[in-house]
Image (spheres, helix red, strand yellow):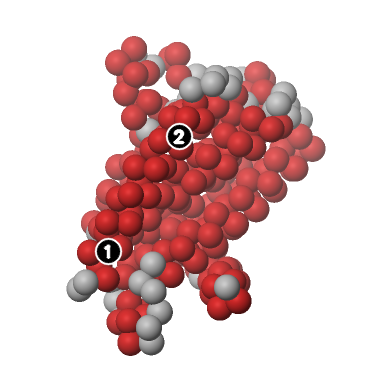
Amino acid sequence: MKAFMYGIVLQFRLDIRSKTMLVTCYLVPLIFFFFMSGIFISVDPSAKNTLIPSMSVFVITMSALIGLPPSLIEIYGGEVKKVYKANGVPVYLGIVTQFISSFLHTFIVCLIIFAVAPIAFGAQLPNNLLTYFCSLISLLFVTLAIGCVLGLLIKSQAKLTMIAMIIFLPSIMLSGIMFPATMLPEFLQYLAYVFPATIGFKAMTAFEVWHLPVLWAIYAVLCVTIFVIIRLKSRD
């Protein structure tokens, strides 16, 4: 257990020094937050009501889909996996420590937005903090799991970037964080629910009972997928 905790702490420290993690998890999301928040509110003053969830969804999607997968490619697509095997380290350790580290970094940025938005932009705090944070954490788990699947399945960095953007852009544009989803054509409003970001944003802004079970059902399916991929990679 001590070795496992040491691995998590080590990965957390390594990610702090990682330029990819710095850019995708901290720099770009926070710049987007400070730059776009003022624009959103000046265009639509009612955006203050959903500013915190909107920016949190952007942070989660950016970090999990753009920041996490390249790190997994380095672990499972290079020499690190061979080092794991040679030293008797379980193959799954890399993805577990990376998942937890990414979760912590992303959650820290979400907390920064939660604390700063009301002061800097007069954003309204969520009405129910319990359902808000449960929804945020659920979305974070699901989106990180998607990032893990991408990082495990795709071996080429160029192909990974393309596929990640194919998921990232619709998640942002259709979820309702940039503009009200009701402005979209009806078929796109239904298509948006294919992306967990839409369900997560709805759960954080207008919580309904079915939101969390759906997110955790998706997470369970993704976990099974990750388990199967890891088992196959352990035989290589």
Above or below 61: residue 185: above
Mark sitting earlier along the chain (2/1): 2
Whether residue 120 sits left or right of residue 186 in the image: it is right
Q: Nearer the viewer, residue 148 or 165?
A: 148
Q: Residues within 10 Å of mark 1 (few under 14, many from 20)?
A: few
Q: Residue 86 bears which disc, if any?
A: none
Q: Nearer the viewer, residue 129 or 45?
A: 129
Type of amino acid at the residue the image marks with label 2:
Leu
| Callout 2 secondary element | helix
Q: Nearer the viewer, residue 73 or 165?
A: 73
Residue highlighted by disc 2: 215
Please give the name of the residue rendered at 57% of the width and 34% of the height, measured from the top-left corner: 135
Q: Nearer the viewer, mark 2 or mark 1?
A: 1
Quadrant of the rendered image containing residue 170: top left
Residue highlighted by disc 1: 231
Q: Position of residue 147 (x, y in %)?
A: 38, 52
Please give the name of the residue rendered at 37% of the width and 49% of the height, measured from the top-left corner: 223
